[in-house]
Image (cartoon, grey):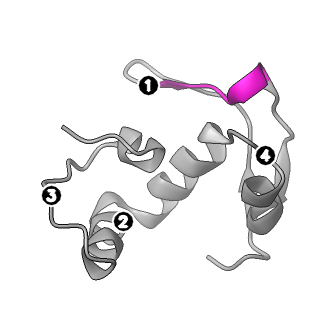
Amino acid sequence: MTPESMIDNGRITSRWLSSKNGGRRYRGRSRSNDAFARSKSNNVAAVKLYQSSGGDAVIMAARNLGIKEPLSDDPSLALGTSE
């Protein structure tokens, strides 16, 4: 994924996950740099990026950045949570 890659910002609802953006605003497809730079709380794009990258890659990136705490392979990790 690059800053120019397109990411869908549509609402996520499944049996185990429901992700909403701050203000419940959804902008459809947009470039990833726009999705994260212009939005104060773009939870949906963060979770979709996590899903497309895979949990292992996200956890590895966190480790490379110096995070040593246990991290669970769960979409909520994209929102800054881990149990």
Boundaries of the magenta span: 18-24
The residue tagged 2 is 58
The residue under label 4 is which amino acid type?
A: Ser
The residue tagged 1 is 17
Whether tag 2 and tag 1 are in contact, CB under 8 A, the answer is no
Distance in Å between CA atoms under marks 2 and 1:
18 Å
Residue 72 drawn at (x, y percent): 20, 47
The residue tagged 3 is 69
Q: Quadrant of the N terminus?
A: bottom right
Asked whether residue 22 is drawn in magenta, I would say yes
Residue 60 tag number: none
The residue under label 1 is which amino acid type?
A: Leu
Q: Give the residue displayed 63% in from the left and 26% down from the top.
A: 20
Residue 70 or residue 48, whichever sits in front: 70
User: Which of pointers 2 and 3 lies earlier in the amino acid sequence?
Assistant: 2
The residue under label 2 is which amino acid type?
A: Val
The residue under label 3 is which amino acid type?
A: Glu
User: Which of pointers 4 and 1 lies earlier in the amino acid sequence?
Assistant: 1
